[in-house]
Amino acid sequence: MDNIKYLILGAGISGLAFAYEKRDSDWLVLEKESHPGGLCQSFYAPGFVWDVAGHFFHFHSDKTKQFVKEMLEGVELCNVTKCAKIFYADRYMSAPFQYNIHQLPPDEFMQCLTDLYFATEPQGNVSFKEFVRQKFGRGISDKFLIPYNEKLYACDLDELERDSMGKFLPKLSFDMLMTFYRGQKGTTYNDFFLYPREGTMQLINSYMNRLDTSRIHLGEAAISIDTDNRTVHTEKGDYHYEHLVSTLPLNNFMRMARTGKPDLLHSNKILILNLGFDLPSRDKEVNWIYFPGDEVFYRVGFYNNIAPREKMSLYVEIGCRSDETIDIEKMLERTLVDLKRVRIVDEHRLESYHPVIVEPAYVHISQQGKAETDCVIKEMQSRNVHMVGRYARWEYSAIDDSIEQAQELSNII
Ligand SMILES: Cc1cc2nc3c(=O)[nH]c(=O)nc-3n(C[C@H](O)[C@H](O)[C@H](O)COP(=O)(O)OP(=O)(O)OC[C@H]3O[C@@H](n4cnc5c(N)ncnc54)[C@H](O)[C@@H]3O)c2cc1C
C-alpha cells in the first residue's frame, strides 16, 4: 500500500490549489474523471468558448487577485466592469434589484421604499424567506428576492436558514439607495472581474503546468474511506495517508466514510445550456440578466460581451429539484421560446449548443443540515481529514474561497 503525506480527493480548483501549496512535499491527487478541473471546465465549439455556466474571477482580497494574476501570466485576460440587469414585469432594469428600486413604476417604488423604511433587523432563527422579508421589507422580497431565489434553489425558501447566501446577498442601506438613485455607482465586491479569453479552464491549465502531473491520478475515483486506519480505497488500490484533503461533495464523502447522516444534506441541481447563435447579440453591454418571472431560466449570461466575440454566445441556467428528471431537449425548446419572449433572440439561429447538468449546484443550507455539517467537519478534523471548497464544506462559496481555503489549510498542516 502507498503511503502518502497529503492525499487529495478531487482535481477541481480546490484540490489543485492545495496540491500547488504542497508541491515540494509528498502529495497525490485522486480524480474520478478523466480530466481535471471539476466545475472549472471549458468547452470549445467553432467560434464559441463556454464554461459550466460562466465562471468569472471575482475577488474579495487583493492578495488573492494578485496571486491569480501571477498564476495566469501569459494568458489573455479580459478585465470586465460588471453590467448586470433584471427582467422584471416585461422591462429591463439594473441589478441588484434592491439598489435600483427607483427604476420601478412609481407605485411599486413607493411600496418597496415604505416597506424598507419599516423593515427591522431579523432576530433569532428565522428562515431565509422570513429573513429577507424582515430585512428588506415585503416589496423588495416578494417582487424579486424570493421569486428569483426560489427559481435558483428550486425549493421553498422557508427550508433554508437565515444566512444561506452569506456574503453573496448584497447589503442595503438608505445611503446606498440614494447613491444609486442619484445615478452614481455604488460599490459591490463584484463590480469588476477577470476572465481568461479562452475560458476558466485556463486557470486549471496554469496549475497543471506547475505541478508534477504524474501525481495526479485521473480516472481513479475514491470508493471508500476508512478514517480509523487512514486509508482510501479505489479500484486500482489502497492508499494510506497522513492527512486527507477532501474536495468531494460532503454528502458523498459521508457515505464513503460511513459517517454522519448524509440524508440531512440537500441541494438543487441545475441544467446549463450553453448556446451559440449565428448573429451578434442586440445588447452589446450586458454580462448577465436575472429572471424572477415565469421564464424557464433564472439567469442568462452573455459570454460574447465578456470575452468579446462576434456571435451571440449564451449560458442559460435552469434550477431543478434534485429528484427531478431533466428532459434536455424539452428544456432547450422552452428556453428558445422564452429567449424570444424576453427579446434576447429575434432572427437568431442556433448554431451549436452544449448542455451540462451540475449536482450539487447550490446547496440548501438548513438548520439541521448545518448542524450536521459542522459536526462532521469537526469530527473529521480530529482524524486529520480536512474539507476544502464549496461542496466539501457544503456552503455557498466561489473560486477565490477555494484558493484561500487551500492556502490557509496548507499553513496549518
Ligand atoms: C452555476 C455555477 C456558476 C458558478 N459561477 C462561479 C463564478 O462565476 N465564479 C466563481 O468564483 N465561482 C463560481 N461558481 C462556484 C465554483 O464553481 C466553485 O466554488 C468551485 O468550482 C468549486 O471547486 P471544487 O474544486 O471545490 O469542487 P469541484 O469543481 O466540484 O471539484 C471536485 C472534484 O472532485 C472530483 N470527484 C468527485 N467524486 C470523486 C471521487 N469519488 N473520487 C475522486 N474524485 C472525485 C470531481 O470529479 C471534481 O473534479 C459557480 C458554481 C456554479 C454551480
Image (cartoon, rainbow, N blue to C red):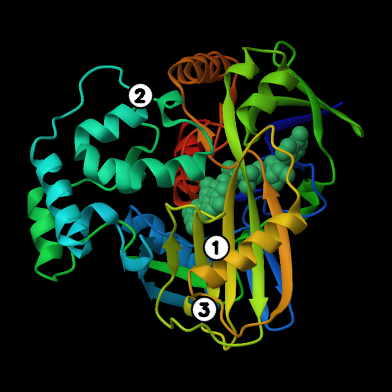
- Per the rendering, the mark at residue 190 is none
Q: CA distance from mark 3 to mark 1?
A: 11 Å
The residue that disc 1 covers is: 54
The residue that disc 3 covers is: 307
Q: Is ligand 1 within 8 Å of the beta carbon of the residue shown at mark 3?
A: no
- Quarter of the image with the N terminus is top right
Please provide percent x and percent y for residue 163: 34, 31
Vertical position of residue 123 compared to residue 320: above or below: above
Q: Residue at x 65, y 70 (%)?
A: 275
Q: CA distance from mark 2 to mark 3?
A: 39 Å
Please state if 173 lies on the left or on the right of 53 as rendered.
left
Q: Amino acid at mark 2?
A: Ser
Q: Amino acid at mark 3?
A: Ala
In this orientation, does residue 17 appear?
A: no
Badge 2 crowding class, 10 Å Cα cut-off, few under 14, some 14 to 19, many 20 or more, is many
Q: Nearer the viewer, residue 281 or 260?
A: 281
Badge 1 crowding class, 10 Å Cα cut-off, few under 14, some 14 to 19, many 20 or more, is many
Q: Nearer the viewer, residue 38 or 232?
A: 38
Please state if 347 lies on the left or on the right of 352 as rendered.
left
Please provide percent x and percent y for residue 11: 69, 47
Q: Secondary structure at mark 2?
A: loop
The residue that disc 2 covers is: 127
Q: Secondary structure at mark 3?
A: loop
Q: Amino acid at mark 1?
A: Gly
